[in-house]
Image: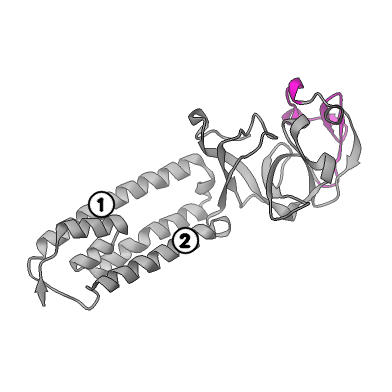
Amino acid sequence: MLKKRSPLLAAALSLLAPGLGHVYAGNARKGLLLLGTPYGMALLVGFAGLFSTFYGLVGLLLFLIAFYMFAIVSAVRLALRQHEYQLRPYNRWYGYLGIFIVTTLLGHALFGARGSMLGYETYHIPGQSMDTALQVGDFITVNTRYAQPQVGDVIVFLYPEDRSIPYVKRVAALGNDRVSIEGGQVLRNGEPVSALSVPAQSRQRDYSITMAERRVPADEVFLLGDWRDNSNDSRFWGTVPTADIVGKVTYVWFSTNLERIGMAIN
């Protein structure tokens, strides 16, 4: 059966899933290649660790915009050339629907496994315990390939009293360290750590000014919030195993305060 291909329908299908318009217009091989390209690019960016950088994310978004435009234009041009197209077995509505469902499921599976496959996770900040480094309304990106905690890093971890809840705090001491607070200053192995200094107005309460020395068990970390007076942290529930660390916070990818978008977290 001969049937002309519609450029408008080719464009619409390409917008729905880049490559689907090519399948409709008669080039299934190119269409399937285009359908798989975004997933291959996402895996490449993930393996390179670029999702945990703001510029890596922006670069991927720009690539996807250009890729969609190319796919749409290419599908329209192909459809315009198909004046008398011989329908193939896959040129049925259920064929297009099946391809769309499969690619959508693959996308959801890849996004669902982003922590392990793409090297990043995203979270929303609901509280003020890390103010001002992190503020209510921030959406953060976390590098899940983070393996070696360092003092001063802001990390996401599993809350010891309910491991289904992700928490965010700053690393104050590592395994086998001694940690204390004197005059509001955090001491690690008896020495003040500048990376853990916070404004005086954030440490007015007694438990933020003084803490007796504690020793951190091996393979665990001691964590503090930047707003010491308003932080539920290792002072109250102890240290956290390094195995329960999700990753290091790298940047704010979106925020209700638009000026914070793209801000690196140190």
Asked if residue 186 lies left or right of residue 27, the reply is: right
The quarter of the displayed image where residue 83 is located: bottom left
**Front of the two marks 2 and 1:** 2
Q: Position of residue 100 (x, y in %)?
A: 34, 65
Question: Which residue lies at the image location 27% right of the left edge and 65% below the top edge?
Answer: 31
Identify the amino acid type marked 2: His
Looking at the rendered structure, the secondary structure element under dot 1 is helix
Of residue 129 and residue 107, the one placed in the foreground of this image is 129
Can residue 96 be seen in this snapshot? Answer: yes
Q: Position of residue 20 (x, y in %)?
A: 28, 63
Q: Position of residue 207 (x, y in %)?
A: 86, 31
Q: Position of residue 123 (x, y in %)?
A: 58, 46
Q: Residues within 10 Å of mark 2 (few under 14, many from 20)?
A: few
Residue carrying label 1: 70
Specify the farthest residue to the top.
200
Question: Which residue lies at the image location 70% right of the left edge and 35% below the top edge?
Answer: 129
Specify the farthest residue to the left.
83
Looking at the rendered structure, the secondary structure element under dot 2 is helix
Question: Which residue lies at the image location 59% right of the left edge and 48% below the top edge?
Answer: 143
Identify the amino acid type marked 1: Phe
Asked if residue 35 lies left or right of residue 226, the reply is: left
What's the magenta region? 175-202
Residue 145 lies in the magenta stretch: no
Asked if residue 123 is positioned above or below residue 93 in the image, the reply reads: above
Question: Which residue lies at the image location 52% right of the left edge and 42% below the top edge?
Answer: 53
Specify the farthest residue to the right.
212
Can residue 75 be seen in this snapshot? Answer: no
| Colouring of the image | one colour
Asked if residue 40 is positioned above or below residue 174 in the image, the reply reads: below
Residue 187 lies in the magenta stretch: yes
Residue carrying label 2: 108
Q: Residues within 10 Å of mark 1 (few under 14, many from 20)?
A: some
